[in-house]
Image (spheres, rainbow, N blue to C red):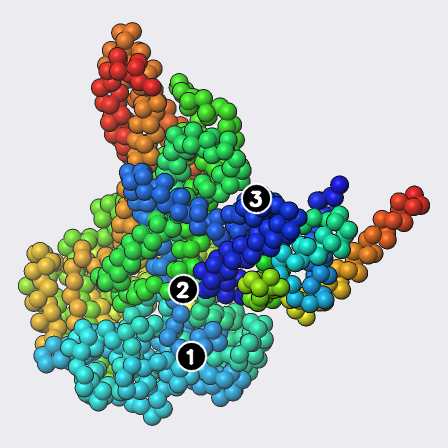
Amino acid sequence: MEIFRKLAFWRRRPDFDAGLDDEIRFHLEERADALERGGLSRPAALLQARREFGGVARVAEETRAAWQFPWLEDLFADLRYAARALRREPAFLSVAVLSLALGIGVNTAIFSLTMEALMSTPSARNPSELVWARLGGSSHIGPAQLRFVQDAKVFPGVAGLREDGDINWRRGDETQRLFAMRATDNLFAMAGIPVYLGRGLQAGDQDAVVITHRLWRGKLGSDPGIIGRTLILDGRPHIVVGLLPENHRTLMGLGLDPDLYAPAINNDSLQLYLRLPPNTTPAAAYQRLHAVAASLDQAMPARDFHYANDLRLTRVTGLERLTAEREVSLFFAMLMFVVTLLLGIACLNVSGLLLARASSRAQEFAVRASLGAGQGRLLRQLLTESLLLALAGTVAGLLLNLALTRFISGLTLENLPLPIAFRISPDWRLLGYASAIATASAVFVGLVPAWRASRAKAGDALKQGERQVSGKLTLRRVLVVAQVATSILVLTTAILFARNLLRSVSINPGFDLNQTLYVSLRLVPDRYPNAPGRNALAAQAGDLLRATPGVVSAATTGMIPFNDDSTYGGNLYVDTSASPVRMRRHVNRVGPGYFRTLGVPVLAGREFVKDGEEGAIVNESFARLAFGDVPPVGHTFRYGDTTQTIIGVVRDSKYAWFSDHQRPASFTSYSMGAGASNEAILRFMVRAGVHPESLVRPLRRRMLDVDPSMAVEVKPMRRATGMALLPSRVGAGLLGAMGALGLALTGIGLYGLLSYSVARRIREIGLRMALGAGAGSIRRLIFSEGAWLVGLGLAVGLLASALLTRPLAQFLVDGLTNTDPLTYAAVTALMLLAGATACAVPARRALRIHPLEALRYE
Amino acid sequence: MPNPELLPGTLYLLVLRTLALGPLHGYAIARRIKECSGDFLLVEEGSLYPALNRMLVKGWLTSEWGVSESNRKARFYQLTEAGRARLAQEDHDFRRMVRAIELVLDNA
């Protein structure tokens, strides 16, 4: 192979050079011998031989070239030259690298976050073979059905997992609620989940748990002898059999970060996970599952429900999972879009700088061209320089990425119903993405200046750079306009989210946030195995709450506003119409006095007066959609086999999200179920006559008096809106930072252009001053140039924003649209301010020009 | 008057053919080509040595140091198997080309 022979050459290059000298000398001497024989004197013969041979150095050089890699050598030469050229201009270099580093750092950090949130690979053996199966469209199935699928033996592995299992941990006098994943005893073996110490759950495990690294380090003091230690969970001693590694990621993904895994309780319904045989196509897997589901329908027929309908298989890795999480994916897609814009602004900045540099280097290029450098060679030189810049920017950007992702990994999101954490570490995906970004930036940054340079005529440039007058829309100005427009788009998004956050915090949710608290009691299921026992406890706890001084009223509820949600879809039949009404409605079970406690007005009829009462209460939107103008009290609606008579109508309010707007809702009377996991939580809304914070401790103490094994949570509603505010909060925080960054970069770009333009127009300005132009008119000259660019960019940017931010509407609270005038006014004001700042310094410099010096300036 | 311009692409062929009889040093290769062509073809040193090295890179030749008839240290080039195969190929191609050109010149 030639390349190996060439490579081997490099090792013995000194030998080669010495040998080549010898060889040429030998040649000359032989020729001289021949000439001497022809009658010349020795010195004359040697001279003649040398003359015939031509340039010895040239021959040696060309001979060596046979062994070299010309393009590589050229590249090195270009790189060396580029590095030297860049080093000569430290100010340019630092602004360019800083711009790129910010753009690339933020971009890759969001990329890392997105990858971790949406595409992280679960900790499992061959995770690509694992799928989450939904039978009959439901996310969970009962244990009997799960066993049926296991016994069918058509899949190499079948296991169940449940994500929202609370467990009470008794620790001295304290009872804490831990977040447990409930798993069938074969899950660890089936999925091949790696364990750091000890072992996973296995068949026969009853009171055994596998704990996560977070719990171990955070609450168990990193005890090295943890395996075999006992924790009192739900009133019974449980043995810690295993400790998970720090980088454990659940099968469910999305950053879910539980405290421990415990065996599933008998009547828990579970998510169904299957291991497919290697290389199974989705269609084949679907067919297998369909056969099992069809026989399940025969074995366990259920009314109006077929397991074989609406089957869904979702791989736990890769893109497929995104389709299962549309809203979250959309949110991250938006973030990625915004950071791409941001990188675009940074690139435009560098592009503009390069252009300015190219025009001041026009003479250098003209000289090189007239000395014989080809057009292609010069282009390559320019692209090499931008590549070098992009590389430097990427390296600096990756450092920024590490700092940012480390910061994000350290964050814990407060006030969420589920523990979520993102543990981001750099990986090959980031490296691949960063290289792609670096290349793209290099091309993007270098293309315009290179194209411009390729059109330059050597002759023109040699004649002392042309002096620009004003007004023309040069390439650089186009870049700045693009920059202004892009950062308008980023700013609009940022301010929309900030406005959304502010509005959410101050919005009237339709109930009283200020004087209410929630109390949540998580029972040990074994202590209250049946519904009557639980309802008795509910009654006792409710009486105690109401008897606490400072409490106005208290009511049971199935869901705490802004913390829980449940939606029913499907057809609804009302007695006033023959055709069904389709609506997706929020549903809840509430006790007597619930609406009074929350401060939600009852518009017609009445509230429930006792638990377990017949009838339903609906909200205004439900009434309007289902009954139109007919007063609904006394009428009935039916879904499936259930018919409800409406006993009251209440005003609309927010239920789960601040963006809830005219969301239909129906309420039935409260009673507790006997389920194991999620139904073992008893919830109350409490209305305080005093400051709610002052009630937190007394209420908590009273509840623990009822039963110290309960995990008690008491929180004023003001502080309990974390989940509902999460999208706005994350959006406003991240996007606000990006908006500021984009604005700063654009300011730098504008400033660079204007200073450059002042520098080029020194003579013109000097002349104007000499002819009597005042400070005002000079200032106007500079500001009008800036105003032109900003104005044009603003127009384009605002228009683009109005069109492109439309998908954001679903994150916004009602009353706020993506064309919110105040947002656009704020964006305009900010941009004008940034523009004015960017103009001010060059304008001052222009005013300091001394007419005489300027006229001499050449 | 000898014509110093070789037909393009023929230098490799001439060098390979010259070496077919045995190892030679660079000066001898140039001299042999000149003599065998009746002093018509002159190989420029400026193209001979780069060509020899390109042929080394391609693996058609190997080289080693030896002593010339004039008792000087010289570098001798030798055909490899690949070089021999290449010679056969180039020889065949070149003769076919020349015959074809002759046919056109004679008959067209």
x then y, percent, for residue A104: 35, 50
Q: Residues within 10 Å of mark 1 (few under 14, many from 20)?
A: some
Q: Which mark is residue A428?
A: 2
- The one of A447 and A481 positioned closer to us in this rendering: A447
Q: Which residue is mark 1?
A: A125
Query: What's under tag 1, amino acid-wise?
Result: Arg
Q: Position of residue A439 (x, y in %)?
A: 45, 50
Front residue of this view, candidates B54 and A340: B54
The mark found on residue A40 in the picture is none
- In the image, residue A138 sits, relative to residue A106, either above or below, namely below
The x, y position of residue A266, in whole percent, is: 34, 85
The subunit letter for the residue under badge 2 reads A
How many labels were placed on the picture? 3
| Location of residue A356 (image quadrant) | top left
Residue for point 85% across, 48% down: B101
Q: In this orientation, which residue lies closer to the viewer: A416 or A299?
A: A416
Image quarter where the N terminus of chain A lies is: bottom right
Quarter residue A642 falls in:
bottom left
